[in-house]
Image (cartoon, grey):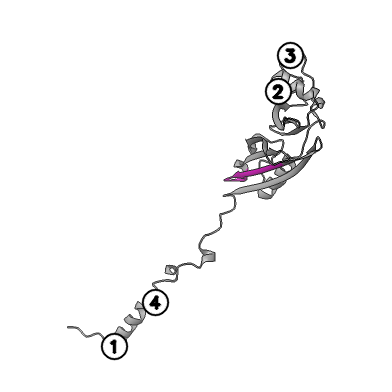
């Protein structure tokens, strides 16, 4: 049987009570999860009140993506009683009229706030171009509704809310205050006949 010198035995016993390395200790709670690296997540939110037809509507927008360049923007138009009247979602890359393709989170937040500004040509649908009888669409407008719906919105002067939905166009939503509904009329492209 081999005898171990006493001081080596004491060193071995002392080492058994110590951790193998500093990294084997659990991390404190505040350091347990590392923050996401820059560019791994991009988020922004914006809200605005839209006063139309004597009522206060709420416009909410959010944008989320793995990167700011890949963010998806969503717009929600709410009635004064908070009901959702209209919602739409677009990749921000498809709306260069509103979103900077090389922006960061601060830029996205600024762009989102600007995106929900009402850019309608007037307060009510009668500011939109008339849809001539027999024409496939109104001039400078890509309709998403039948002619009767479009012309009714114009005739009854329904409030309209428009926002960029592409590189050159603005989507226009008409709100029927009496019926408490909203309909996407289509997209106006003022530069095109």
Q: Is residue 66 magenta?
A: yes
Where is the C terminus found, in terms of image quarters?
top right
Q: Provide the residue designation for mark 3.
A: 135
Q: Position of residue 190 (x, y in %)?
A: 78, 26
Q: Earlier in the sequence, mark 4 or mark 2?
A: 4
Q: Nearer the viewer, mark 4 or mark 1?
A: 4
Residue 61, horizontal then vertical, whole percent: 68, 42
- Please identify the quadrant where the N terminus is shown: bottom left
User: Which secondary structure, mark 3?
Assistant: loop
Residue corresponding to mark 2: 142
Residue 104 in view in this figure: no
The reply to whether dot 1 and dot 3 touch (C-beta < 8 Å) is: no
Residue 6 badge: 1
First in sequence, mark 4 or 1: give its number: 1
Task: Report the Cα–Cα distance between label 1 and label 3.
Answer: 104 Å
* The quarter of the displayed image where residue 52 is located: top right
Q: Decide if residue 110 is on the left or right side of residue 5.
A: right
Mark 3 vs mark 4: give the one in front.
3
Residue farthest toward the left in the current orientation of the protein: 1
- Which corner quadrant of the image does residue 81 belong to? top right
Q: Residue at x 78, y 35 (%)?
A: 119
Q: CA distance from mark 3 to mark 4?
A: 86 Å
Mark 2 vs 1: CB contact within 8 A:
no
- Examine the rendering and report whether any part of residue 146 can be seen: yes
Number of residues whose C-alpha sits closer than 10 Å to that of mark 2, classed few (under 14), some (14–19) or many (20 or more): some
Residues at marks 4 and 2, CA–CA distance in whole angstroms: 74 Å
Which residue in the structure is indicated by mark 4?
A: 18
Question: Are the residues tagged 3 and 4 within 8 Å (C-beta)?
Answer: no
Q: Earlier in the sequence, mark 3 or mark 4?
A: 4
Q: Earlier in the sequence, mark 1 or mark 3?
A: 1
First of labels 2, 1 by sequence position = 1
Q: Secondary structure at mark 1?
A: helix
């Amino acid at each position: 049987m081999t005898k171990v010198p006493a001081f080596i035995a004491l060193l071995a016993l002392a080492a058994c009570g110590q951790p193998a390395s500093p990294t084997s200790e659990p991390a404190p709670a505040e350091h347990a999860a590392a923050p996401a690296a820059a560019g791994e997540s991009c988020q922004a939110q914006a809200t605005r009140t839209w006063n139309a037809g004597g009522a206060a509507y709420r416009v909410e927008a959010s944008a989320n993506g793995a990167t700011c360049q890949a963010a998806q923007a969503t717009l929600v138009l709410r009635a004064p009683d908070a009901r959702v009247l209209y919602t739409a979602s677009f990749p921000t890359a498809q709306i260069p009229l509103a979103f900077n393709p090389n922006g960061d989170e601060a830029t996205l937040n600024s762009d989102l706030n600007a995106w929900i500004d009402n850019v309608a040509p007037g307060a009510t649908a009668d500011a939109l171009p008339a849809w001539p009888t027999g024409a496939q669409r109104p001039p400078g407008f890509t309709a998403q509704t039948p002619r009767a719906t479009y012309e009714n919105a114009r005739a009854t002067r329904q409030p309209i809310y428009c926002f960029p939905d592409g590189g050159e166009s603005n989507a226009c939503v008409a709100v029927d205050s009496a019926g408490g509904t909203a309909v996407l009329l289509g997209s106006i492209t003022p530069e095109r006949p």
